Image (cartoon, rainbow, N blue to C red):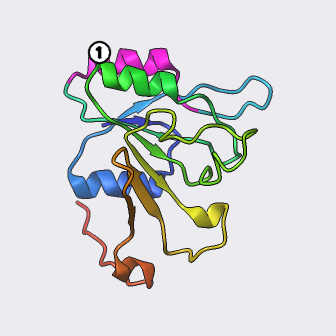
């Protein structure tokens, strides 16, 4: 899995470990005016997809934790040229597409799977993250997770 270096580390790294997946971390671009990291460039993603043809997908966070985003369409196109899905953590962008002056959502930009957490932008239960795929069918967390069930930690080596 090709993963943006500045993802939400705890969730992503735990998920990768649970899946037994290996990650290749991609350097994000840095916004010149703020000095904050955004997403990897299209060139970085394309080069990584060429260097790691066994990659099963690309995972980025958009917008970043400061609300800054970039156009995801070029990243989606690069992924699709290599026949891998673009997965997007859109936790801070669930409100995108709610107004014409806001950026396009990840799905509207060509992402294949999007996870958002509407509580970041809308009033909802904090235990209801939502995952949407290109099929357009939203998926919410299992009932146990929504009600704060405790998960047993997996022993590390």
Question: Which residues fall within the magenta stretch?
Answer: 39-53
Residue plotted at (39% across, 20% down): 78
Tag 1's secondary structure?
helix
Q: Is residue 155 inside the magenta stretch? A: no
Instruction: Give me the residue at 51% from left, 51% from top.
Output: 8
| 68 relative to 48 in the view: left or right | right
Image coordinates for residue 99, horizontal then vertical, percent: 72, 46
Q: Establish if 4 lies above or below 43.
A: below
Residue 127's place in the image compared with 132, above or below, is: below
Q: Residue at x 51, y 33 (%)?
A: 109
The image quadrant that residue 1 belongs to is top left
In the picture, measured across the screen, residue 55 lies left or right of residue 46, that is left
Provide residue 105's location: percent of width, then percent of height. Answer: 56, 42
Q: Is residue 154 left or right of residue 93?
A: left
Q: What type of secondary structure mainly makes up the magenta span?
A: helix
Q: Position of residue 16 (x, y in %)?
A: 30, 51
Q: Is residue 47 a member of the stretch shown in magenta?
A: yes
Q: Residue at x 28, y 54 (%)?
A: 17
Above or below for 127 versus 35: below
> Image quadrant for the C terminus?
bottom left
Residue beneath label 1, please?
50
């Amino acid at each position: 899995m090709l993963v943006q270096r500045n993802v939400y580390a705890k969730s992503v790294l735990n998920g990768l470990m649970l899946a037994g997946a290996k990650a290749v971390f991609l350097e994000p671009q840095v916004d010149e005016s703020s000095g904050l990291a955004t997403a990897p460039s299209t060139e970085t993603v394309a080069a990584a997809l060429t260097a790691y043809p066994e990659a099963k997908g690309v995972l980025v966070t958009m917008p970043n934790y400061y609300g800054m985003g970039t156009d995801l369409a070029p990243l989606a196109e690069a992924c699709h040229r290599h026949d891998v899905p673009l997965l997007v953590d859109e936790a801070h962008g669930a409100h995108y597409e709610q107004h014409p002056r806001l950026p396009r959502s990840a799905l509207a930009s060509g992402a294949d799977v999007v996870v958002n957490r509407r509580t970041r932008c809308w009033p909802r239960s904090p235990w209801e993250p939502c995952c949407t795929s290109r099929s357009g069918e939203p998926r919410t967390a299992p009932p146990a997770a929504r009600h704060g069930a405790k998960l047993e930690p997996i022993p590390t080596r």
